[in-house]
Image (cartoon, rainbow, N blue to C red):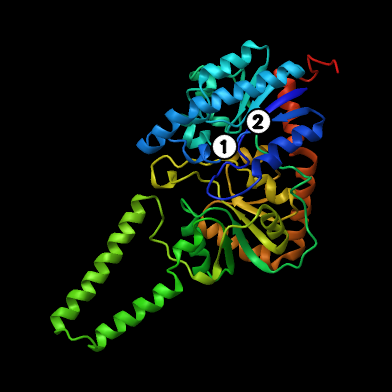
Amino acid sequence: MRIFYASDTTPNALFQSNLWRNNLYLPLVDIGHDVIEFDYDLRETFQNLDPADPRQKAYIKKNRPKISQELLRQIREAHASKPVDLFFSYFYDACVLPQAIDEIRSMGIKTVNWYCNGSYQLHLVSEISPYYDWCLVPEKFRLKDYVAMGARPIYCQEAANPNIYKPYDLPIEFDVTFVGQAYGDRPAYIKYLLEQGVDVHVWGWGWQSLSPKPRLRKWLARLMHALYRGQFLLTSEGRQAVRQRLHSMLDAREASERRGGQPVAVHLPHSILGSTLSDLQMIQMYSRSKINLGFSSCGNTHETGQRILQVRLRDFEVPMSGGFYMVEYMEELEEFFNIGKEIVCYTDKQDLADKIKYYLIHEEERERIRLAGHERCLRDHSWHKRFEMAFRQMGLSEPPHTSA
């Protein structure tokens, strides 16, 4: 097929990554499709997706028509050169006007949108989804919601590209690691593991903010020490007032961060907190670790009465990369892995700590599971196979345009 592909390189504009290009664009090319890539920098667009924020809403209103106009121009040009069979996008409402999707379809081009945040951010694609011919949906429990909004969903779980995610012959340096952002209940789990004596390290956006900067820690320690020793020309009441003021300032800072969604109640030692890794460094970390962790909860839904769990990209990336993988149990995972034989699942913090200690000791069993998980992913969980399955369901196995 001749496919026009449109997406940012990553679903998270906070840091540079080729995550979606590696997992979506490249497999489409590998399969043998003629793929034309939308030539447009979408990075700023993917930083302004939420119309509930007045500033972002203003940006969306101004930017959305521009993207739509340029998208239509490039598709018309590509279609005139040689007929395009499919428009494949990873778009939010903020990326394109519904009328532009209608215009693409009027050219005789089929349309499909991939989106993987519908578990708790379905509202960000609710306007455009009904305008596509199909929506690829990895959240099985959201299929009925897509139908209710007038869309045509196809269940298509996430996967991994074996040409990118693969084992590396590197020394094993860490007992337990996690690579990913610091949000939701993840910091609380990491803190609990440390309290249970587990040697765990984390890398990713947001983790370093959970430990006071060394300079700030040193300054505060010296200031409080000086106050208690009476080194300032203050009465005892004055020193007490300053101490109370410092504590109030710190409390206010934490309250402000809490309103911003940062789990400030959890403080972690600076020595275990790493910065964001490159795509290659992340994949290599899976080979450098005895146990790689995964978390299944979405956003801050653990703070509500409706905690949402979701199968994630990492659930396939780690075993595809040859790493031993341990993730929170959810029933849907059983459709993709033999739990306990290809990956390991835990049910709560204590179960996680207990299983980590068990598998650190039982190296042969851990190795059998690691190898089996890798083989299962190679056999069943590549994006290449996901797309072939989805295209068959769309009736696009045989491209309608075959002329050179």
Q: Residue 38, which numbered label?
A: 2
> Is 5 drawn above or below residue 150 in the view shown?
below
Res. 129 image quadrant: top right
Q: Calculate the distance from the C-alpha at mark 2 to the C-alpha at mark 1.
A: 10 Å
Q: Amino acid at mark 2?
A: Phe
In the figure, is residue 155 to the left or right of 66?
Answer: right
Which residue does the numbered mark 1 point to in the structure image?
A: 42
Instruction: Please rate how many residues cluster around mark 1, counting C-alpha atoms within 10 Å: few if below 14, some from 14 to 19, many from 20.
Output: some
Task: Indicate the secondary structure of the residue bearing disc 2.
Answer: loop
Rate crowding at label 2 as few (under 14), some (14 to 19) or many (20 or more) other CA atoms within 10 Å: some
Determine the residue positioned at 78% across, 20% down.
397
* Label annotation for residue 271: none
Question: Which quadrant would the N terminus be assigned to in this image?
Answer: top right
Residues 334 and 317: in front is 317
Q: Is residue 292 above or below residue 121?
A: below
**Horizontal and vertical percent for residue 159?**
69, 40
Name the residue rendered at 74%, 27% in the picture.
389
Amino acid carrying mark 1 in the image = Leu
Mark 2 and 1 residues: CB-CB less than 8 Å, in contact? yes
Where residue 109 sits in the image (x, y, percent)?
68, 16
Q: Nearer the viewer, residue 31 or 325?
A: 31
Rendering coords of residue 299 (x, y %):
47, 45
